[in-house]
Amino acid sequence: MTKKKIVVAVTGASGSIYAKLLLDKLQQLQNQLTEVAIVMSDNAKQVWEFELDNAGHGNYPFKTYAKNDFMAPFASGSAKFDTMVVVPCSMGTMGRIASGVSDDLITRAADVILKERRRLILVARDTPLNLIHIRNMQTITEAGGIICPAIPSYYSKPKTIEELAMTVVNRVIDLIGLDNESYRWEGI
């Protein structure tokens, strides 16, 4: 298996638990990775601290980049990051990505991933959706991105909020292409 170079972008949408659990899981799967880079919006930090009652977003062994650091390696296709996950992905960020507006490092990196025909995974967390959201999802999908709504599954019979959220994170791990032990549907 080829090791992955991954960018994890965290926006200010509600759902910080998804970002936390993904980063926790990537720590566990480091033997499959060459690099993980993190970029967070200002709102993402505030929402994380509010929802999770901690500032643990700064405690990961991955390099973190400022939201306007256009010198970050993944701001260029030549750095060969193969996957970017935006988790949770706000509808505003999704709209800017769909429009090609690269006004911060998150949207610039997403633009680079799409132009290089690499894997962009947006974990959309908003509901309900309006027609603008749906059209933005269509545009991103047609450009090669993957929309992975933060909709948990229940067939594994999760007992805690973390187990429930992990059903989404395990799906993201599969989309990235990492080997992962998780519940698999076997049918009834």
Image (spheres, grey):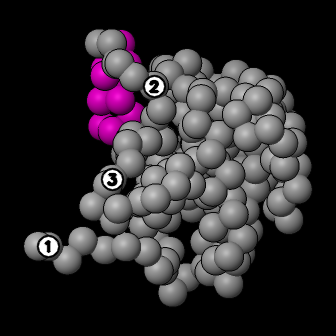
Q: What secondary structure is found at the residue carrying circle 3?
A: loop
User: Is 97 situated left or right of 16 in this image?
Assistant: left
- Measure the alpha-carbon separation of dots 1 and 2: 30 Å
Q: Nearer the viewer, residue 84 or 163?
A: 163
Please say if 132 is above or below 102.
above
- Which residue is at the far left? 188
Name the residue at 76% across, 29% down: 50
Q: Which mark is residue 153?
A: 3
Please say if 156 is above or below 65.
below
Q: Residue at label 1?
A: 187
Q: Residues within 10 Å of mark 1 (few under 14, many from 20)?
A: few
Mark 3 vs 2: CB contact within 8 A: no
Q: Residue at label 2?
A: 126
Region of the chain picked out in magenta, as a range: 132-142
Looking at the rendered structure, the kind of residue marked 2 is Asp
Q: Give x and y (percent) for residue 71.
A: 85, 42
Name the residue at 27% across, 61% down: 155
- Measure the alpha-carbon separation of dots 3 and 2: 17 Å
Q: Is residue 136 magenta?
A: yes
Q: What secondary structure is found at the residue carrying circle 1?
A: loop
Looking at the rendered structure, the kind of residue marked 1 is Gly
Q: Earlier in the sequence, mark 1 or mark 3?
A: 3
